[in-house]
Amino acid sequence: MSRISVQNVSKQFGSREIFKDLSFDIEENEFVALVGPSGSGKSTILNMIGLLDTVDSGKILINGKVLPKVNSQSAVHYRRNVINYLFQSNALISTSSVKDNLMLAMTFSNFSRQEKEQRIKETLEFVGLQNRLNSKINELSGGEQQRIAIVRAILKPGDIVLADEPTGSLDPEMSQKAFDLIRTLRDQFGKTILVVTHNMEQARQCDRIISLESVLAN
């Protein structure tokens, strides 16, 4: 059974058809790159899998079950416990501390406060930012902020990571370092990752590349 199964999905904005009858599968613990030209619907696909947008027709299954409706209570549970997002903008609270941002990510986990603090400490050590625990997000460099976003994906419940151009705002050296760290989400933490990227060098480092142009042409 595929971890993610997109089956004959179509999406249209106004009179513009984004894609039609799109289908692909992602297996558990895969690290997959989704590529295609600008405007081809890559981010839209992530948003539909993440229940931030709706499917016009077709269906998306997670572990063999059709996704719930976007505004349902089941969708809230799904976003909290199944899905992790990595954005290019990091989506961190810039005026709050690293610790507060990471504690927020574990709001719905079953750990005690002491256990949460210990997990934060250990994971910050893993990415080399143990000295930034009490720093405000807006005091960090872009590369440090992206590492904190990756730590959040490690700590937050949910084993599917949807990454939308997560290294796009970084310089080439920091971009590759961040991408290597994203790969550890799969290698060491068992996450399934779907990453949207325009960086073909990094896409080729994934287990597999899904090209929207090729998939839709077939």
Image (cartoon, rainbow, N blue to C red):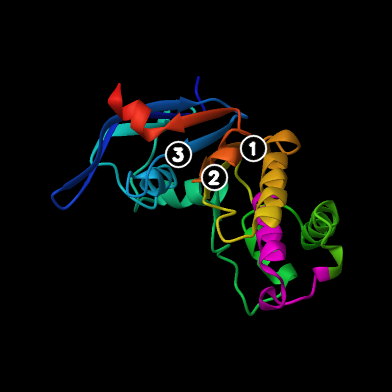
Chain part drawn in magenta: 132-154
Q: Write down the residue under mark 1.
A: 191
Q: Specify the principal SS of the magenta part.
A: helix
Q: Nearer the viewer, residue 96 or 35?
A: 35
Mark 1 and mark 2: Cα distance apart in space: 21 Å
**Residue visible at 63% across and 34% down?**
205
Q: Write down the residue under mark 3.
A: 35
Is residue 198 within the magenta segment?
no
Q: Nearer the viewer, mark 1 or mark 3?
A: 3
Mark 1 and mark 3: Cα distance apart in space: 20 Å
**Residue visible at 59% across and 54% down?**
167
The percent coordinates of residue 9 (x first, y second) are 29, 33
The percent coordinates of residue 16 (x first, y second) are 18, 48
Q: Is residue 13 above or below residue 58?
A: below
Closer to the N terminus: mark 2 or mark 3? Answer: 3
Mark 2 and mark 3: Cα distance apart in space: 9 Å
On screen, residue 46 versus residue 80, left or right, reads left
Specify few, some or many for label 2: CA neighbours under 10 Å numbering under 14, 14-19, or 20 or more: some
Is residue 141 within the magenta segment?
yes
Query: Circle 3 — which element?
Result: strand
Closer to the N terminus: mark 1 or mark 2? Answer: 1
The percent coordinates of residue 159 (x first, y second) are 61, 40
Q: Nearer the viewer, residue 111 or 145?
A: 145
Q: Nearer the viewer, mark 1 or mark 2?
A: 2
Q: Is residue 129 above or below residue 54?
A: below
Mark seen at residue 199: 2
Closer to the N terminus: mark 1 or mark 3? Answer: 3
Mark seen at residue 208: none
As shown in the figure, which amino acid type bears the numbered disc 3?
Val
